[in-house]
Image (cartoon, helix red, strand yellow):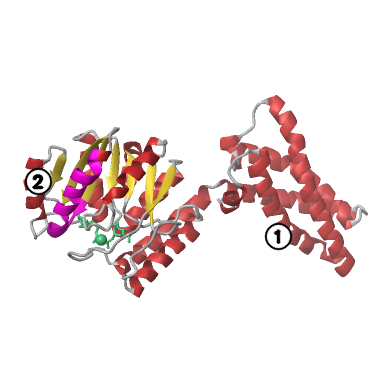
Amino acid sequence: MKVIIIIPTYNEKGNIERLIEILQNDVFPNIKNHQMHILVVDDSSPDKTADVVEQLTKKYKNLHLLNNGNKLGLGAAYVRGMNTAIEKLGAEVMFEMDADLSHDPKKVPEFLQKIDEGYDMVIGTRYSQGGSIPSNWGIIRKIYSVFGNLLVKAILMRFWIHDWTGGFRALRKEVFLKEKKELTSFRGYTFQVSFLHKAVRDGFKVAEVPIHFTDRTLGRSKIAPKEYIAELLTYVVAARFWELVYSPFLKYAITGFTGYIINAVGLEYFYRQGFHPSIAGAIGAELSIIWNFVINNFWAFNQYKITNPLKILVKFPQFNLVSFGSLIIISAILAVGNYFFGPASRQIFLVIAIGFFVIPYSYSMYNIFIWKRWHISFLSGLQKMVG
Ligand code: GDD
Ligand code: MN
């Protein structure tokens, strides 16, 4: 495959030559199964980084320069570089890599190995076994980096990716082509986080490679964490909000709420007919089962809907079995409430039973057994519960 390593530069005159030489002489010769190229994207660096690269293009035919950009930030530089890499240079796989030697060029084959295994995007990660951040980073930058990543993970509810902000990555061109329209307005860390988030959201296969991030020895960083923190937080909170709005969970919750009304009306009706509250609640629950199955099937779990009549014949009893679990939970809790507080407590205990017990239980059962939306290991299934 044609692989293009994209290196954005802004005042990296002292670093870029060394990085290019290492890639060309120590890294590329060991990669036999891919054609390796470099594309430097320079935003009119005042230190004339572009001139240094220009000189080197005479020596290396697989080195390309995209210069005279306006300094619009890292995201814009990558979008410009990736467009050129695909359209003009025919890239199939692209790397994101810093010019300042913070990213060890010798790791490139490991990223490619993952691409060869079929992954769409490979993330260099500093926060898992075998990775690290520089010990000489100031405490403030360490805090920003560690907590920034934790916060992103927690808000996006995706704990299996350990490094969201890092800038050493490999990706297939399809990932960029799919997401590029949505990337143009993001700068700095937000670019890295949003790109990865959109790729994960759209089901691209993501792998991680542990990396040691070394602090630059020449020049200075152009990306100040505090400049981007508000933008980054806004992005992750908004992204998560919309994900929840569109997720099956919200639809499941609405279906469940209407089911609850059916349940409550049933409880009231049959209690007034002279039934014991636990029996009356159970009859109400029974009525909402059919409602829940139909609406969840055609709305919340629409993407996984069961239409084959034979399958419905199998699934509906299964659904009833799952719901029988809910029924037992509800009548047990109503019985407890009735025992301690008398029949007047019945509606409150119905709310407790549903809110704290039935929802977590039934939502997982639907996802795991009925519509089989979660088919990964139990732990990541738990992490996906809210989405
Ligand atoms: N063309 C262009 N335009 N290049 C830029 C710009 C820009 O506006 N801003 C930065 N760069 C280049 C730098 O010259 C360097 O090659 C690379 O992008 C990374 O910039 P640094 O200034 O070295 O960033 P950093 O070390 O603070 O941040 C790195 O680590 C972060 C995670 O801690 C980058 O890899 C970030 O992407 C990453 O999020
Ligand atoms: Mn750097």
The amino acid type found where label 1 is placed reads: Phe
Labels 1 and 2: the sequence-earlier one? 2
> Number of marks in the image?
2
The quadrant the N terminus occupies is: top left
Which residue position is annotated with label 2? Answer: 56
Q: Position of residue 368 (x, y in %)?
A: 65, 43
- The residue that mark 1 highlights is 356
Q: Secondary structure at mark 1?
A: helix
* Residue drawn 32% across the image and 52% down it: 168
Q: Is residue 305 above or below residue 223?
A: above
Q: Residue 183 location in percent, x, y? A: 32, 49
Picture quadrant where residue 193 is located: bottom left
Magenta region, residue range: 8-29
Is residue 32 located in the magenta-colored stretch of the structure?
no
Rendering quarter of residue 147: bottom left
Where residue 287 appears, x then y in whole percent? Answer: 78, 44
